Amino acid sequence: MYDNQVGRFFNIDPAIENYKSFSGYMYGANNPLRFIDIYGLGPGDRIKKAESFIRTKYSQKEGLNTGKELRTGNSQAALEYIDCSELVCRTMAADGITADIRQMNTEDLVKFLSDDDKFITSKDEPKAGDIFLWRSGGKGHTGIVEKVDKDGTIHTIEAYGTNEGTDRFERKLTQFTNHKGWKGFFRPVVETPDGKVNENKKVEKKEKKSDPLKVTIETGTITKKTNIDPNEIHSWADFKRELYRWLNWHY
């Protein structure tokens, strides 16, 4: 249904409900040089970055991938081994969720991702690009949701263990929700429909509506404030003002 020569779909994108501000016939948020469309589910920089770590060896051994330089650096030694939390930290940095690569384990990630002002949390509604996390009894695991099939199968990218390394996995929702210490699926609150973090939205707050014109009325020794509509008629001058405005608007 997709013509890569014109960058358009012949039919409406089935995932259009997730990207209401865009046309349902375009590819990669209309910016294919920057974004890739993950399995037709929409652009996903987090998925693309997590995918780049596939086949990286797994380790938590001291000297192999412990310490700040090996956890956050970009040298050959730092990128030779990775574990689940490092995968997520590097992915978040690449996607602009964090300004740099942070050294956080799953316990730190629980605190970081639980900030309701920064992240939306869902216990049982995963979406492509979500970070999943569980933590219990001093142990935890995390990874990136790559896609969700119509039958509910959840495809993930995880740094799982020394035998598996970083790879793709398929899980059922119950494997997450029934897990002891399940925290949920997380995505940035300020994420734009094209899958990027919008820094400008971080400072957006609803402004309080300003009060109507306040007029102070002196009544003897008592002063009180009341809200008066500036367009209300209280005198002949007000009447003529509104009459002329009405005539100018109609004629």
Image (tube, helix red, strand yellow):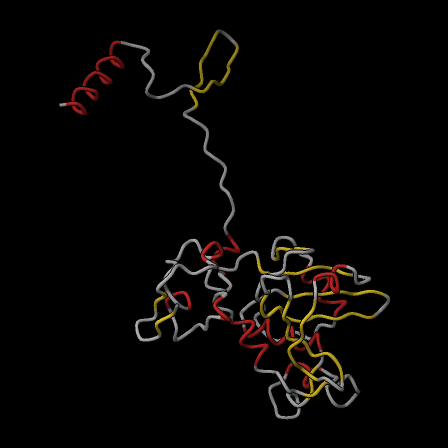
Side of 242 relative to 22 (left or right) = left
Give the residue at the far bottom of this rendering.
76
Number of numbered discs visible in the structure rendering: 0
Give the residue at the far left of this rendering.
251
- Where is residue 102? Give x, y as percent: 65, 74
Residue occupying image coordinates x 75% and y 84%: 66
Front residue of 13 and 216: 13
- Where is residue 18? Give x, y as percent: 49, 56
User: Which quadrant of the figure contains the N terminus?
Assistant: bottom left
- Where is residue 251? Give x, y as percent: 13, 23
Front residue of 136 and 12: 12
Residue occupying image coordinates x 62% and y 62%: 151
Give the residue at the far top of this rendering.
220
Front residue of 34 and 175: 175
Give the residue at the far right of this rendering.
137
Front residue of 142 and 215: 142
**In the image, residue 1 above or below residue 159:** above
- Where is residue 42? Give x, y as percent: 48, 65
Residue occupying image coordinates x 51% and y 43%: 206
Q: Quadrant of residue 68?
A: bottom right
Q: Quadrant of residue 127?
A: bottom right
Q: Quadrant of residue 143?
A: bottom right
**In the image, residue 220 above or below residue 215:** above
**In the image, residue 113 above or below residue 67:** above
Residue occupying image coordinates x 51% and y 63%: 197
